[in-house]
Image (tube, helix red, strand yellow):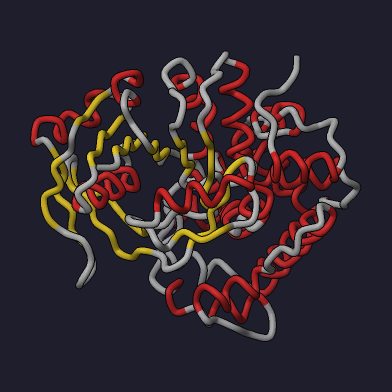
Amino acid sequence: MTRFTVIGAGHGGKAMAAHLALMDCRVTLYNRTPEHVAAVKARGGLDLDSYPGGPRGFARLAGVSSDMGEALAGADVIMVVVPSSAHADVARAAAPHLSDGQMVLLHPGRTLGAIEFSKVLCDHGCRADMLIAEAETFIYASRSDGPAQARIFRIKEAVPLAALPAKRTPEVLAALAPFYPQYIDGVSVLHTGLNNMGAIFHPALTLLNAGRIESTLGDYQFYIEGVTPSVARVLEVLDRERVTVAASLGIRGRTAMEWLKLAYDAAGADLNEAIHNQSGYYGIKAPSTLNHRYIFEDVPMSLVPIAALGQHYGVSVRGMDSIIRLACIIHRTDYWRRGRTLDKLGIDRLSVGELTQFVMEGVRCWEG
């Protein structure tokens, strides 16, 4: 029996823990705040509801804990299902407790998440012979229906995943295949990170609708009413910059138009038209506040590292920098300082060839 630990008891973590338990896995759910999982611990598991034909029922868990050492002890696979802004904190807490042979998967890594996680482990003295990987996006569309309840609306059919180093991705895919055949080879963590569509859609669309969000508390259709021709032109510029950054690293990134066609079979003459032709966007409300993960997570953990790669390798990222600076002003914080910059990740002195070799072949630890 494969032993899983799921770190994070938000809607995603609860959905994943429940689904794995219903697939007869031994699952421990961890959350750093005991009160947040008290109801789950008292019941001994989670109630999972789902779409017609999807997984549902009472999922009994092997353990519920707010002690990281207890949660990681004996785990084969560790699923990290927290906002990417918390990845470094999880790595610091996990560093003393990880063991040889364990796998840590970030769901998702956003941009360069696996590199950040590995660097923090190294900085905190973790020398375990374990493996880190990241998914390009979260496999579930889910929500929390209560303190011990979760609901799955959809399970994605194909989710790219890559290990650090990429040569070990087949090991991760083989370990997950009995439970998640949806995971496919994502080539490398540069590919999964630079195909991060949330970096393009979320921050700019939120910031360019700041007045409307604050005046309506998000009571409008985010993608349909919030995307106008002018807003879409900004998204197109950001997307071109992202694809150009990827090209500077020898990567053929998917454009937003290609992604909409691939994921939703939505097409159009331009991005504005393609977004409005995506039927799944109808009915999705805007965030009710600007204090939302579309800014405080997606800017420092997605836009900043993409823009930093662009600046380092000679790509103009003025559009991205503008959005980052707007976020800094509105949130009165320095997201360039808080974000995943290349010096923080320990890759600021690498050439394109050296960075590619690092993500494909890997090294155990940074020097100094």
Q: Is 262 on the left-hand or right-hand side of 98? A: right
What is the x, y in percent for residue 44?
11, 35
Please determine whether, in this image, residue 35 is positioned above or below residue 201.
above
Q: Is 15 on the left-hand or right-hand side of 214? A: left
Q: Quadrant of the N terminus?
A: top left
Quadrant of the image occupied by residue 46: top left
**Nearer to us in this view, 335 or 23:** 23
Quadrant of the image occupied by residue 75: top left
**Residue under the image location 30 percent in, 30 percent down:** 30
**Residue under the image location 68 percent in, 85 percent down:** 269
What is the x, y in percent for residue 183?
46, 59
**Residue under the image location 35 percent in, 26 percent down:** 72
What is the x, y in percent for residue 91?
50, 25
Q: Is residue 209 visible?
A: no
What is the x, y in percent for residue 285?
41, 62
Q: Quadrant of the C terminus?
A: top right
Q: Is 282 on the left-hand or right-hand side of 15? A: right
**Nearer to us in this view, 305 or 300:** 305
**Residue under the image location 75 percent in, 18 percent down:** 367
Name of the residue lying farthest toward the left: 43
**Nearer to us in this view, 358 or 110:** 358
Quadrant of the image occupied by residue 276: bottom right
Please determine whether, in this image, residue 122 is positioned above or below residue 2.
above
